Image (cartoon, rainbow, N blue to C red):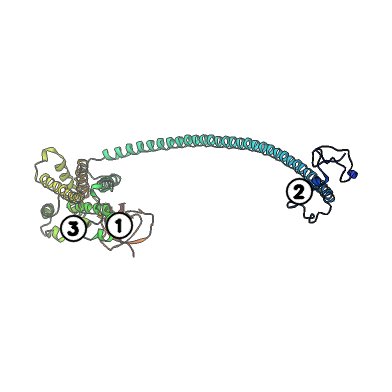
Amino acid sequence: MSLNIFGGKKSDKSEGSGEGGGKRGGGSPSVGEYISKIDEFLNEVEGRSFSMFKRRDDSLGDMLAWARYAYRERSKMENHINMQAKSLHRASGKIEDQYQRMENMQAEINDLEFKRGRLVRERDELVNEHNRELTHIAELRSMEVDKEGEKHREQVTNIRKDHQKEKDKLVAQLLVSQRDDQGWPDDKMGIKFRELQRLMESVTAPRNREFLIPAGQKLPSHLDKTGFLTRAGNAKSHFWLKSTLWSIIAEQFFSAPFGFGVLGPGKSQKHLFEMYAAWRKLFDANAVAASPDREDYAVFRQDVLANNWRSTTFQYINVALTTPEQSHSPIAQLNTENFNDTVSRITRVLSEVANLSHAEIRPEIQDQIRQMVALGRDIALQFGIQPAQMQLVVPKYGEKIKIGEKFHDCEDGDSFKGKTQSVDIVTAPGLEKLGDGRSDLSAQRAMVPCEIYPIEED
């Protein structure tokens, strides 16, 4: 069976029938027509794929040659397609394998992510549990420490209370064991003097902001006579203020030794000394009239009888000042004048300082001023009553002192014991006792240390 490319039908006839083998007059094409159609077909396909058909001496042979060529090309194409199909099949298999591997890997990744998430959750739970345990341990420890601390504080408080009760009991016994018209024991004198220091500290403390000197403000020379604030700065103004108020107390009550300054400087001092001179002349007509202007107080250090007279006289003065019936006596009037003058001087200084900050003196400060002045007066009276000589320790500017029992630094106390410093200002006078007023008239004993602000070294 052969392929009939012209009619689309199958033919069992051979080509051997010749050119006249077909019907000429009927409906069948002639051999020439066949050849013509073959040529047309070859011409049609020649431009696309076949360059071999240049001359067509044998159209049928050319046709067969094309058929063989087409068959070969078709076989090549089929082989190529089969090879491509196999390659595609192999590639598809590989892709499927890769997809499968990817799916397996994704499954492993998902499994690892799940496990990682579970591990993270477990880790977070462990961390949280650990933190909770640490917090619980810390809370327990804190509770134990607080409990122990509270127990310790309670024990310390109880010890302090017991100590304070015993101290208060002893102080009360000490303070009432002696009448005020008699000389105070040394312990009572020390307690009273420290109380005066405490009142002074309370009035001048930096917490009383109305008495702080504003930054850049310069005090007039009549207040800061030594220029201390220019040297130390306004931040140290509370030391200057305490020194200034102490100076007023010293001038009003301690301007003369042996209690002769208790009624103030000037004429009051003279009146007291005139009493001594009149008494002296009663038994010694040749006695030289002593005068406070000459600072002739050596007799009280050298003559026991004169010293006893002094002590007894000041005991009577104390009675006159503390007895209501004697409130209009000349001594009482001098005392009142000096008391009011002292309060007025302190108040003027504090008011002038407070005005720098546009403030006023509070009522509680005014009460403390009067307490301070009254206590200063009582201590000055004791200077006269005491058989031994009591005196304030007030070193001068630039004087060399040694930190220790007698002198303290106003900021560091006696931390640098043994250190020599130069005095700038005295922030709190000390209290010192000379002899015992009887057999010993010269031995010195520091009862309360003097506090100084040292000259700052460059």
Crowd tier of the residue under label 1, counting other residues whose Cα lies within 10 Å: few below 14, some 14–19, many 20 or above: many
Quarter of the image where one finds residue 395: bottom left
Viewer-nearest of discs 2 and 1:
2
What amino acid does circle 1 point to?
Answer: Tyr
In this view, 333 is above or below 402:
above
Viewer-nearest of discs 1 and 3:
3
Kindly identify which residue carries mark 3.
220
* Image quarter of the C terminus: bottom left
Crowd tier of the residue under label 3, counting other residues whose Cα lies within 10 Å: few below 14, some 14–19, many 20 or above: few
* Residue 11 percent across, percent down from the top left: 86, 38
* Image quarter of the N terminus: top right
Kindly identify which residue carries mark 2.
40
Dot placed on the residue nearer the N-terminal end, 2 or 1: 2
Q: Secondary structure at mark 1?
A: strand
How far, Cα to Cα, is label 2 from label 3? 137 Å
Quarter of the image where one finds residue 407: bottom left
Kindly identify which residue carries mark 1.
453
Is residue 439 in view from this perspective?
A: no
Q: Secondary structure at mark 2?
A: helix
Between 166 and 9, the one nearer to me in the picture: 9
Viewer-nearest of discs 2 and 3:
2
Q: Secondary structure at mark 3?
A: loop
Image point (86%, 46%), residue name: 19
